[in-house]
Amino acid sequence: MDERQARKDKMVRHFRDVLNQGNLDAIAEIYWPEYVLHAPVGTGDTVGYAGLRQRVKEFRTGFPDIHFAVESIILEGDDAAVRWTLRGTHTGNFVGVAPSGHAVLVPGILMVRFAAARIIEGWSGFDALDLMQQLGALPR
């Protein structure tokens, strides 16, 4: 398998294995230990394996039926961009918001930088205000 395909596979595994299936053991195969994620929801940057595990647990606790659909992947050198759509039902506590029972639909994008065969840094972009409104935590 060439490096380009290996990187694409890691992006798919991030969504399928880690986020959708909750396979936290796969994190060490996909990311560097120094991984940093910059994202709009949470308490600052997500750092390292422990931070990423905690972030995945937060999403999977808030939305036990969570499903990220990968819409497209673009690779350019050491960079990759993924357009995704999150669907789930808010039946657990999520970033301090009590369960609402609301179904959510959130489109977003993840940009990452690879160092050799693993992801070292990521930038997640989605409309966090819209997500909070869908949860009923903020007025529309």
Image: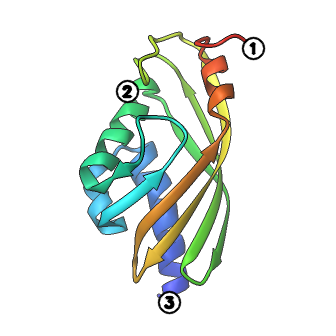
Give the SS element for disc 1.
loop
Q: Nearer the viewer, mark 1 or mark 2?
A: 1
> In the image as oriented, which residue stretches furthest toward the bottom?
2
Contact flag, marks 3 and 1 (Cβ < 8 Å): no
- Above or below, 2 against 43 in this view is below
In the depicted structure, whether residue 74 falls above or below residue 64: below
SS of the residue under disc 2: helix
Q: Nearer the viewer, mark 3 or mark 1?
A: 1
Q: Residue at x 52, y 46 (%)?
A: 39
At 42% from the left and 27% from the top, the residue drawn is: 64
Give the residue pinned by disc 3. Answer: 2
Amino acid type, residue under disc 1 in the picture: Arg
The CA span between labels 3 and 1 is 47 Å
Q: What's the mark number on residue 124?
A: none
* Residue beneath disc 1: 140
Q: Position of residue 59 (x, y in %)?
A: 43, 33
Q: Quadrant of residue 25?
A: bottom left
Residue 126 in the image, given as x and y percentages of width and height = 64, 42
Query: Is 114 above or below relative to 97?
Result: below
Report the residue at 44% width, 46% height from top.
Answer: 19
- Mark 2 and mark 3: Cα distance apart in space: 36 Å
Which residue ends up furthest to the front in the rendered image? Answer: 44
Q: Is residue 109 left or right of residue 43?
A: right
Disc marking residue 61: 2
Circle nearer the N terminus (3, 1) = 3
How far is the residue under mark 1 from the one under mark 2?
24 Å
Whichever of callouts 1 and 2 sits on the residue coming sooner in the sequence is 2
Label 3 crowd (10 A; few <14 / some 14-19 / many >=20): few
Q: Is residue 104 left or right of residue 65?
A: right
Amino acid type, label 2 = Thr
Q: Residue at x 62, y 47 (%)?
A: 125
